[in-house]
Image: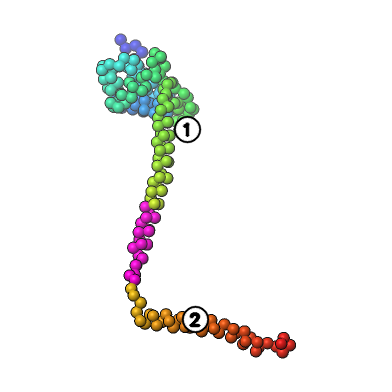
Amino acid sequence: MRHRKRRTKFNMRTSQRKATLRNMVRSLLEHQKIETIKARAKEARRLAESVITLTKYDTVASRRKAFSVLGERDLVMKLFKEIGPLFKSRTSGFTRIIPLGYRRGDGADIVILELTEKTIVEKKELKKKAKKADEAKPEDEKTAKDDAKKEETKTEDSNIKVTPKSKPTLADEKRHERAKSEDRKAADHRGFMKNVRGLFRKRGDR
């Protein structure tokens, strides 16, 4: 007999309806909550709770049943290792529906379908990854600056030309001696300007 077997069809074909419900259950298990309309949330809730009840007995048969709904091995592993242990003390009530209001376009009831027990490990891991990335950035900048400085010093050293020392020639020695003699003459005639200034003084100043 098919009493109480009628369910909402969402104006879809059977294959489309099953695919949408399976996709909703997958996203629910991955993100722990989804936002949808009330009618779809009620149908997806039935399927999600039947999948979570399979984790009560971790057998090959139960894993195969879960895989027939989810279709992903990684998600099945997450279901039995991470999500299943959260509901050990529960026999039902694995999900809940929270109303949000009405959609502006067609007035449909918008709700949040979420798991009653959640894990907070993902947020901590994301924070740790962000901290590691921030700590690694200044070190990389320092190394880049040091490398740039080293390259600049190398280029400067390469541009500098080292002139080899050679013995002074006779012409250089004569120039050096002339310069010395001129310096001596200038030193002897230091008081010459004082006498010249005395000539231009006024008569009253004398």
Residue 204 is drawn in which quadrant? Answer: bottom right
Q: Main secondary structure of the magenta part?
A: helix
Indicate whether 62 appears above or below 28. Answer: above
Residue, disc 2: 183
- SS type, badge 2: helix
Label 2 vs label 1, nearer the camera? 2
Spot occupied by residue 70 in the image (x, y as percentages of width and height): 30, 24
Magenta segment range? Answer: 147-165
Q: Nearer the viewer, residue 164 or 103?
A: 164
Left or right position of 94 against 202? left
Marked residue nearer the N-terminal end (2 or 1): 1
| Magenta stretch contains residue 29 | no
The vertical placement of 74 against 190, above or below, is above
| On screen, residue 76 above or below 199 | above
Q: Which residue: 41% across, 25% down?
A: 119
Picture residue at 65% right of the left edge, 89% below the top:
199
Amino acid beneath label 2: Asp
Disc 1 marks a residue whose amino acid type is: Arg
Which one is nearer the viewer's eye here, 61 or 132?
Answer: 132
Q: Nearer the viewer, residue 189 or 147?
A: 189
Q: Is residue 181 visible?
A: yes
| Res. 68 image quadrant | top left
Using the numbered discs, state the Cα–Cα distance from disc 2 to disc 1 in whole angstroms: 100 Å
Residue 157 drawn at (x, y percent): 36, 62
The spot of residue 104 in percent (x, y) is 47, 32
Left or right of 167 on screen, residue 100: right
Q: Within 10 angstroms of label 1, few (less than 14), some, or many (20 or more) residues? A: few
Q: Residues within 10 Å of mark 2 (few under 14, many from 20)?
A: few
Give the number of the disc on residue 118.
none
Screen quadrant of the N terminus: top left
Write the residue at 40% across / 36% down.
129
Labelled disc at residue 104: 1
